[in-house]
Image (spheres, rainbow, N blue to C red):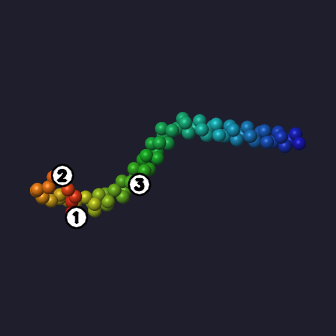
Amino acid sequence: MQKIVNIVAISSGVVSLAVVGSGLFVYLQRDQLIDSVKSQVLKSVTGSLPGLVDTKIPSTTGGVTGGTAGLGIPKF
């Protein structure tokens, strides 16, 4: 029975050290990890952005439709 308790205690210590070590690693490397994620997100977003902007934004805005107050809703 004592051997089982010792094995459980040692494995508990190893797991605790692993959790503390990985938490410390993430804490110390957080700036690099955030920058890495930001660059990956920007690469994926900018790849699809030019096609989206070219199709959604009109090249000209059209003339002024006088007589109404406010900005109005553009018709495409």
Q: Residues within 10 Å of mark 2 (few under 14, many from 20)?
A: few
Residue 76 badge: 1
Residue 70 badge: 2
Task: Please state which of residues 70 and 25 is positioned toward the viewer in this rendering.
Answer: 70
Amino acid under disc 3: Ser
Q: Tag count in the figure?
A: 3
**Residue 17 position by quadrant:** top right
Tag 2 secondary structure:
loop
How far from the left and from the top, in percent, is residue 42?
A: 39, 50
Is the residue 23 above or below the residue 49 in the image? above
Apparent side of residue 64 relative to residue 5 in the rendered image (left or right): left
Q: Which is in the foreground here, disc 3 or disc 1? A: 1
Apparent side of residue 9 relative to residue 59 in the rendered image (left or right): right
Tag 3 secondary structure:
helix
What residue is rendered at 18% in x and 52% in y?
70
**Mark 3 highlights which residue?**
44
Q: Which is in the foreground here, disc 2 or disc 3? A: 2
Residue 7 badge: none
The disc, 2 or 1, on the residue closer to the chain's N-terminal end is 2
How far from the left and from the top, in percent, is residue 1?
A: 89, 42
Amino acid under disc 1: Phe
**Residue 74 position by quadrant:** bottom left
What residue is rendered at 37% in x and 56% in y?
47
What residue is rendered at 75% in x and 42% in y?
11
The disc, 3 or 1, on the residue closer to the chain's N-terminal end is 3
- The answer to whether any part of residue 64 appears in the image is no
> What's the CA distance linking mark 2 and mark 1?
18 Å
How far from the left and from the top, in percent, is residue 35?
A: 45, 42
The disc, 2 or 3, on the residue closer to the chain's N-terminal end is 3
How far from the left and from the top, in percent, is residue 27?
A: 55, 36
> What's the CA distance linking mark 2 and mark 3?
37 Å
